[in-house]
Image (cartoon, rainbow, N blue to C red):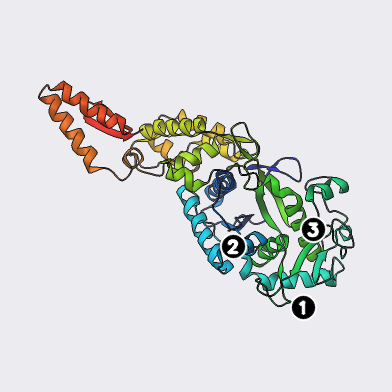
Amino acid sequence: MTGIRLHDTQAREKRVFAPADAGRVTMYVCGPTVYNRAHIGNARPAVVFDVLARLLRHVYGETSLVYARNVTDVDDKIIEAARAEGVEPAVVTGRYEDFYLADMGALGVRPPDLAPKATDTVAEMVAMIARLIATGHAYEADGHVLFHVPSDPDYGALGRRDREAMIAGARVEVASYKKDPADFVLWKPSPDGVIGWDSPWGRGRPGWHIECSAMIERHLGTTIDIHGGGLDLIFPHHENEIAQSRCAHAGAPLARYWVHNGFLSMAGGEKMSKSLGNVVTVGELLEQGHQGETLRLALLSAHYRQPLEWSEALIQQSKATLDRLYRAAGDADPGEADAGVVEAVADDLNTPLALSRLAALDDPARLKASAVLLGLLEQESRSWFQGEGDARVDALVAARTEAKKARDFAEADRIRAELAAEGIVLEDTPAGTTWRRA
């Protein structure tokens, strides 16, 4: 069996991955908050953990993995978006969840096994909050329920920040009802006209952090194998998840391995962020004519833990790489994956090394099987180069062929130039002329 090594954020080192149960490997990844379109930075964790899911299934068997990625469908930003449109929150969340699934699907991201929603898990959140209150780790104040951070002496172990740095980093809300500045909200009141649920503490809605702990407990168990997400979630979100889960489960750890992907930035700029306004959405990139597989390869071109600078040059380089790979693979049926490619992916998802080994393969069947591990070369070669085809282009290619037979080279050159202006590249081979979109 191939040995997998993953960089564990909490251990600060690569560790050999050993699931608690090889027949039921559990992974949870923080998913989207569905109030607008996903930008390409939001797609990076979806693609990264899709590769990890493919690897785990390759090593342990197709049915071995239980992969959950949540959907946050109750949130202050969602409430604001719904209020601005004059619609119910479910209208906003339904629309943008559909967009998210379509956009990620275009990037070759397979759906997770489970996609729990916050609004479907409120009962479990209420039950967990009640346990935290009963054990002295949470308290009710002014219609809110808060987790009392000083009650957990191990708080902060994931990010290894000191207390003052954590408070500053969290930009904590100053509130008179807090016992400690670091305490965070588990439940908040909902006024009339705002989405809410009945609870022992009055009508309200959950805080953000509690939903993941409740979903993991309900669908995967007390302690899971892998918890993933972006670096920006380490604090406060994942620290808070760890604390409330550990305290709700008599000290049992939430996850055995913590895996985080690095940031994506626009070329020469800061981290891509909706709040900074320096974003380009997946939908916009697809509308510009870029294929989803090109965007996927661009996201995999750097190691997942390293920063990635997004640019038009990166997209074009990725397109050229895929053109070469599709030509090399042709229409071969997948064979057996190359051991060197598998080994690279198994070594903490080293996709740059895997891609370099992929490019060196000269066996089309092995190339095809190895690329699938990365979610690449999953189309037919003709589909990659021609899309859904074009009867008009086919007719012009045929007319050019006839012109060449008639030695009317001026007409043949005119047709080539006309197609080139439309981004169509012609390739003359002994077997005839083929075309592809540049």
How crowded pointer 3 is (Cα within 10 Å; few <14, some 14-19, many 20+) is rated as many
Rounded to the nearest angstrom, the CA distance separating label 3 from label 1 is: 22 Å
Mark identifier at residue 200: 1
Rounded to the nearest angstrom, the CA distance separating label 3 from label 2 is: 35 Å
Q: Give, as a three-letter code, the residue at label 3.
A: Ala
The furthest residue to the left: 406
Circle 3 sits on which residue?
A: 243
Q: Can residue 100 be spotted in the picture? A: yes
Q: Is residue 360 left or right of residue 115?
A: left
Give the mark nearest the N terminus, 2 or 1.
2
For label 3, the SS is: helix
Circle 2 sits on which residue?
A: 84
For label 2, the SS is: helix
Residue in view at x 75 percent, y 68 percent: 188
Quadrant placement of the N terminus? top right
For label 1, the SS is: loop
Residue in view at x 41 percent, y 39 percent: 368
Closer-to-camera residue (215/72): 72
Q: Give, as a three-letter code, the residue at label 1.
A: Pro
Q: Give, as a three-letter code, the residue at label 2.
A: Ala
Quadrant placement of the C terminus? top left
Rounded to the nearest angstrom, the CA distance separating label 2 from label 1 is: 31 Å
How crowded pointer 2 is (Cα within 10 Å; few <14, some 14-19, many 20+) is rated as few
User: Which tag is nearer the camera, tag 3 or tag 2?
Assistant: 2
User: Which tag is nearer the camera, tag 3 or tag 1?
Assistant: 1
